Amino acid sequence: MTRPTNVLALCTCALIAPGAAGTAGALTREAALAETSVYRIGYPVEVSIAAGRGLGGAEDPFAANATAAKHYALGRLSYELAYVMPDRRTVYSGIDETNGAMFRFVADAGGDLGAGELFVAKLTQAAEKGAATSTFKIEWISLGHATDDEVDGFIARGLTFSDMFDAVDPANDACAGGYAAIDTVYGPECLKLRTGNRLGMAAGEIAKAASRLETARYAALMGATSELRKMEGITFDAKRSKLYVAISDLGKGMAGASTLAGAADDINLEANKCGAVMQLSVGADMVTTDMAFLVAGGPFSEGATENACAVDNISWPDNIAMGFNDDTLLISEDTNYHQNDALWAYDLDAGGLTRLLTTPYGSEVTSPYYYKTFDDSFDYLVTVVQHPYGESDRDRALSPDDARAYVGYVAIPAKVQGGDRVSFTPVPVPASDAEKRMVRFTDRMELNGTEVALAGYQTLLRSGDSYGNAVFGRAVARDGTPLPDYAGSDLPGGISTSPDHTTLHRTGAGELYLITQFEEELGTMYVASLAGDAVSGTLVVTGLKPVDLSATYGGFDFCAGMATPWGSHLAGEERDLDARRFETEGGVDADFDKYLAYFGYADR
């Protein structure tokens, strides 16, 4: 995912609920930093909804029915998401950055991500270097077992990068003897693990700490392939026993060797700036053994000012999900190479792409998810339109409303079964200025030979919508105080235009809820209560509250997520920050300072 920074100054404070403005009690930077650590960000965050409790009263600053937990045991990464497999124990994840690796976590117990063993992939390319496509063999390297509590304890002790690693700078693109050459999301480095430190830790304890606090670096030291260029969405196809993984851009580490001698060069393909979706074979034990191309984007037109990637093919695939029947893969885009990003349906039998949705100028499509069990009469396809006019065409916004993000859905007036035949009337490429400003979804589908009319995209929430004292997308501090002056917000009033993932929930008591996370340095989540119309399938918001994230030390840059098999919302913190640089530069980082606003720090 990508998020623009302070993209527009068009909106006014009219978006703020009357009487809601205020600031948290001011702390010095040092006092705020003492409340957290750079090692507190970069993990999956799980939010659970308790049935029968509701959002709470007007006096409650947070949703009374929502609790949050941060899962340190999965390791610290720049998560797009952590994807839980049907066995409720296996979790696949990657790094949403250049030179990332692929990880697999196996929990000790189903439905509990608080303890388990972490593995990282080692890829072997079958084709010669520079090939346009290839198959890959996958081997898995264990990074050891850990628990949330153990890792929490390491952080609480004040562990630093230098407590885990010795580091020297490369000389003439090579490492000195005794130092391993790695090239990860942090760039080329020469490192070795310490065998002791100032805290009295032994070698084994240091290795365990490094495996979870410096997961990308530790994985590379253990022999991982660290060359993937922005590993994005992940989903599982039970019919074919395939795991699908979106790769934004087959470039940089995927298309050439590191400049650092001795660093791995496991992936070396012809560059493809339009990206690809890969397919991985999955065994009965939920372990992937090989990887191949499913669909590649392009061709790419160098020098094109608009639509540099072919408009009838994918460009920078992002979130992916199984949808409709067992033969449809949903692929969303986050790209500057299509002027209007699209949501695609890929026919896994026939191999064709159909454009289902297009978004306004400068926005991306996030959070496509198909819900078959949310309602007894309707299926729901939920999709978010993030930061309109934010990544490109910023000068085309005509009013404050143009910049506000959309969280919405399409009600499918049928209960589609896995073996049903489904096809869609494609949405044309937007041609007119009016079409390029709209959220456009196909108006009909065909189900087993019968045409089904669709009511189109229905908006549930937009950035700045108010319900009681809550404002959708507004940053809040640890005590629930609104932060209208939050420095990282896209809109005045501390309001974000970057909702990145939404999940629908129905509790055992029949209550309907929506959980939405925002991609800001000060990560924010909101719970909305919903009411549904049994005849039309229409959903409406009836209440809104932020999620209390104090137990997780707040959040940072929430990216993609999923509804877990046991019904919770699982989010990924997209950025983990470079703790080595943070240490050498005296703990100064502008993005981290935005996060510190959660604890009451404001640089005025």
Image (cartoon, helix red, strand yellow):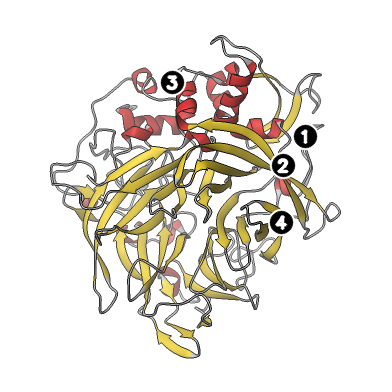
Q: Is the residue 111 above or below the residue 408 in the image?
A: above
Q: Is residue 273 left or right of residue 413?
A: right
- Residue 560 in percent (x, y) is at 47, 51
Q: Which residue is mark 2?
A: 225
Amino acid residing under circle 1: Ala
Amino acid residing under circle 2: Thr
- Label 4 element class: strand
Disc 4 to disc 3, C-alpha distance: 39 Å
Disc 4 to disc 2, C-alpha distance: 13 Å
Near mark 2 (Cα within 10 A), the count class, few <14, some 14-19 or many ≥20, is: many
Near mark 3 (Cα within 10 A), the count class, few <14, some 14-19 or many ≥20, is: few
Residue at 65% of width from left, 43% of height from top?
101
Q: Are marks 4 and 3 in contact (CB under 8 Å)?
A: no
Near mark 1 (Cα within 10 A), the count class, few <14, some 14-19 or many ≥20, is: many
Q: Are marks 1 and 3 in contact (CB under 8 Å)?
A: no
Q: Which mark is residue 263?
A: 1
Q: Are marks 1 and 4 in contact (CB under 8 Å)?
A: no
Q: Is residue 186 visible?
A: no
Q: Are marks 2 and 3 in contact (CB under 8 Å)?
A: no
Residue at 86% of width from left, 54% of height from top?
128
Q: Is the residue 22 above or below the residue 368 in the image?
A: above
The first of marks 4 and 3 along the sequence is: 3
Q: Which residue is mark 3?
A: 156
